[in-house]
């Protein structure tokens, strides 16, 4: 990054809502940012136990993009058999990692995927998120995704987009599609 780039205004962007496309929107921003040689770190909170297409796809954008999955997987649904204490322990470790990475100054864009869900499940506290926001370098753009963004986060954000489900293939009995949904 040159000096002009370091002085750019980093934004706080939130993608929320019950519709599909929150992570996908953040990944689209990742592709755009790589076009400008930005350094991006993507951190997934909840999706730790499944394999997603983005895990392999993002490897092709290295060294500009790093993806880290430290979640213990879905919480209380699908194939989760872990006690909630395990999810909380992993989330606390994740917050420590996020704080260190954000403070490092090594990134232009950081995506905290499914952080809103981690907050709504009580795995991450509002105080922990506020600490991350308060310690964010000026030029860093931070994207937070997940259903159920809290009003205090919405109020603090520079850009908020709510994905609204109007129609979904699952309603017609069509299961999740490889390459589209995961």
Image (spheres, helix red, strand yellow):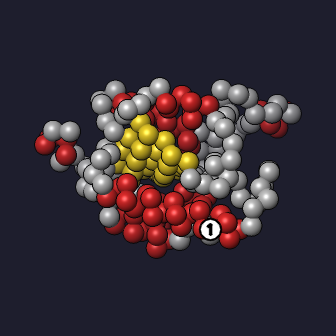
> Is residue 13 positioned above or below 38 on the image?
below
Q: How many marks?
A: 1
Left or right: 165, with 23 as reference point: right
Res 132 → quadrant: bottom left
Give the residue at the far left of this rendering: 3
Q: Residue at x 15, y 38 (%)?
A: 2
Give the residue at the far right of this rendering: 173
Q: Nearer the viewer, residue 166 or 174?
A: 174
Res 182 → quadrant: top right
Residue labelled with disc 1: 88
Q: Residues within 10 Å of mark 1 (few under 14, many from 20)?
A: some
Q: Position of residue 103 (x, y in %)?
A: 31, 58
Q: Residue at x 68, y 70 (%)?
A: 85
| Residue 162 visible, this orientation | no
| Residue 181 visible, this orientation | yes
Which image quarter is the N terminus in? Answer: top left
> Is residue 39 positioned above or below 77 on the image?
above
Q: Secondary structure at mark 1?
A: helix
> Is residue 90 positioned above or below 163 on the image?
below
Left or right: 174, with 30 as reference point: right
Q: Residue at x 43, y 57 (%)?
A: 98
Give the residue at the far bottom of this rendering: 127
Q: Nearer the viewer, residue 8 or 82?
A: 82
Q: Position of residue 117 (x, y in %)?
A: 61, 58
Q: Position of residue 108 (x, y in %)?
A: 31, 44
Q: Position of residue 133 (x, y in %)?
A: 37, 63
Res 53 → quadrant: top right
């Amino acid at each position: 990054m040159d000096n002009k780039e370091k002085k750019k205004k980093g934004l706080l962007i939130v993608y929320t809502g019950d519709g599909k496309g929150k992570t996908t929107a953040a990944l689209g921003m990742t592709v755009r940012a790589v076009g400008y040689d930005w350094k991006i770190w993507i951190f997934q909170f909840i999706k730790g136990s499944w394999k997603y297409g983005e895990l392999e796809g993002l490897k092709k954008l290295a060294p500009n993009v790093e993806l880290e999955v430290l979640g213990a997987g879905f919480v209380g649904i699908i194939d989760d058999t872990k006690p909630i204490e395990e999810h909380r322990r992993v989330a606390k470790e994740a917050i420590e990692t996020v704080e260190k990475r954000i403070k490092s100054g090594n990134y232009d864009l950081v995506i905290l995927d499914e952080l809103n869900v981690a907050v709504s499940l009580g795995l991450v506290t509002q105080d922990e998120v506020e600490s991350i926001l308060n310690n964010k370098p000026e030029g860093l753009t931070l994207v937070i995704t997940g259903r159920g963004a809290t009003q205090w986060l919405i109020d603090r954000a520079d850009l908020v987009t709510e994905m609204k489900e109007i129609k979904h293939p699952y309603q017609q009995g069509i299961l999740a599609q490889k390459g589209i949904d995961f």
